[in-house]
Structures are given as C-alpha cells and as structure tokens.
Image (tube, rainbow, N blue to C red):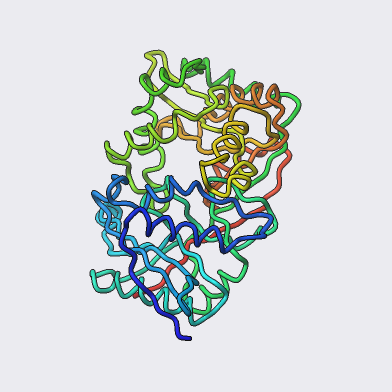
Amino acid sequence: MSVTVKPILPTKSNLEKYVQFGIDLYKGNDYFVPPLIIDEVATLSPDSNPAFEHCSAQSFMAFRDGQPVGRITAIINDLVNSKQGNKAMRFGFVDFIDDAEVVDALFKAACDWGRNRGCTSVIGPMGFSDMDHEGMLIDGFKEMGTMATIYNHDYYPRHMERMGFEKDVDWVEFRMTVPDKVPDKYVRIADIVRKKFNLRTIKFTSRKKIKEQYGRALFELINEAYADLYGYSPLSRKQIDYYIDQYLGILRLEDVSVVVDADDKLVAVGISMPSLSHALRKSGGKMFPFGWYHLWKAIRGHVDVVDLLLVAVKPEYQSKGVNALIFCDLLPGYIANGYKFAESNLELEGNENVQKQWEYFERRQHRRRRAWRKAL
C-alpha cells in the first residue's frame, strides 16, 4: 500500500506512540540506547517545553497499511534564525524504515510545512536547543551509544545523500582510557593556572546547594561559552529553570567540577556522570515498573564508563589552561569510582581547542555524526 503521512497532535498519548516508534525500530540492536520516554514526550510538548516560546514545531508520522513506518519533527527556531539572519527549518527526532518511498514522503511533509512558513533551507537532525539530541550518526554504528547522542541505522546517511542533502558540519566523539593517575602535564598546567588567575575548584556535598548557589549561573555560563558554536540557541530564563529542575537533581556530585575566581564568581564548569547506557537499555526507556531501579543503580552504584556531558569556560578564560584545572579535579574521583573509560560525546570536528584537552590520554575517535543541509 502507499505511504500516508499524518501530522501528529501533541497530546500525551500521541507523543508516547511517536517516541515509542523511535524505540521499537531498534529492537534487537545491540548498540541503541533508548531515551527516557517521559523526557522525550516533555521535550515535544508545547505544554511543558519552554522552548516553544520562540520555536514552532510539527511532528509527522508515516504509515503504511495502518502501521507506523517513520517519524520526523519539523522545527523553526525564531531565536536562532533572527541571530543568524536566515530562515532555516530544523528537522529532528527522525526515524524511518529502509524504504525510499517512506523517507521521501516523510521529508516532503516536513519540508512543505517549513516552506509554507517562509523557510528557505532545512538542516538537521537538530532539536529545539543544544540540550536536545543532534547529529546523524555516519560512522561508529557498532559502538554503544550514550544517553546524550542519537543512534541511527547505517542506511540513514544513504537516504540523506539520495535526497540531495549535503554536509553542513560534522561532530566527532572520543573514548578515552581513564589513567591510573592525573597526567603530570595536567598537574603542572593546573598549578600555573590556579596561581596566575587566582582560581579554585569547589566540591559540593548537596545537590540542593549547587542548584541554589550556581544553578542559574551555570546555564548562563553555558550561554556565554557556547554562544558562537554551530546552531547554538541561547537558553531563556524559563528554559534555564526547566533544565535546572530536570538535570541538576540527578548528578553524582563528585563527577562535577566548579571553578570560581577570588570573588566566588563562576569561571568554568565540568559536568559528567556515570554512563546510563546499559541502564536505559534495560529500562526500555520506561521509568516504571523497574526502569527507575536500573537508573538509580547506575547513578548511585558502579559502572566503568563516565559520560563527559559538557565543559564550559567563560570566554575570557578560554585557551588558558582552565580545562586542566577541571580534569585535575575530576580525575581522582574517576579513579576512585573505578571508571575505566570516558566518553567525550559531541565535539565539532574543527574545534581543535576542545580536542587538545584529550592529547594526554590514551584515546580513539570512535564515532562521527553529521548535520545535513538542503535548500528548500
């Protein structure tokens, strides 16, 4: 039968089915890590995601013979378009079976929606903000995914090229071996930076305290540090409050490094956490009945991989060795907690300053992902 594409009303029930399709498509795949369904539904819902204050979006599902065979969300981020002086439509949350008719119908529906609203180009996969998943996997299909990244089948890039999409940017990812001790070079650099700029690191024993003292400042720092990165969408006050509530309460505090100056003003932050990949796989993306236990066990217990979620440094301190201060603070905790490997997650391939921070570690680049672009 022919393919039918339908716009999805953003009700809880509809969005749960939409997200579930993106999980069911990978049944039996040993490398796919599902998202938490409750979080994905909240992201796609105008009632809960404050990004809808400056974004419009429409999700679509493709059906054949009454069965779902694909999904895609079209997003217009007015904040980014205004900043960049263009009219681009983003696509994200995209999944499809290996069928050209399905893929073409799905992208046609999304692109027509954007074109009818004045968009002149389409890019993706990207979300509403950089806190959402972005970048289509093009290399590293036999590597375990992370909770912060997209996994997709290896036929996806072929369909993108077939439809005339071209590379806009690539991100690379690294897997580092956690050393037995902090590299001497890092120690020397950290000592110099600490004395030269009168900086110090802070450790917290209470999640409530870090939220109260530095929660808002942390995300404002991210806005500063990432302002010029590809496609970055500045987080609004409401988005910051949203992410404070969503993320800061689950951190393992010894995996967080906060760097402040002599006036206790935030200069840099490094946020990491135990890998939840295996826990999410066991949960199937569901919190209940037992998903919460697998996640709790990973956060509070022992896993051998740590995910480096983000490092943000105030612009005036970038390229001055502050990263060494962060990792001199974090590494002893990694070693004590028994982490054997660290996942870098996404780094723009041209961001040499970020990649230099791994030069003192045994490492391998194991994944590459891409944002595609096409004129409408």
Q: Compared to 161, does 310 lie above or below?
A: above
Q: Compared to 246, does 160 lie above or below?
A: below
Determine the residue located farthest toward the front in the rendered image.
289
Viewer-nearest residue: 120 or 298: 298
6 relative to 179 in the view: left or right: left
Disc tally is 0
- How far from the left and from the top, in percent, is residue 163? 48, 78
326 relative to 314 in the view: left or right: right
- How far from the left and from the top, in percent, is residue 39? 43, 45
Viewer-nearest residue: 251 or 345: 251
27 relative to 44 in the view: left or right: right
178 relative to 153 in the view: left or right: right
Viewer-nearest residue: 108 or 123: 108
Viewer-nearest residue: 169 or 342: 342
Q: Residue at x 44, y 59 (%)?
A: 17
Q: Compared to 42, does 334 lie above or below?
A: above
Determine the residue located farthest toward the bottom in the rendered image.
1
The quarter of the picture where residue 239 lies is top left
- How far from the left and from the top, in percent, is residue 29? 66, 59
Q: Residue at x 53, y 18 (%)?
A: 194
Q: Residue at x 30, y 53 (%)?
A: 80
- How far from the left and from the top, in percent, is residue 5? 38, 75
Q: Quadrant of the C terminus?
A: bottom left
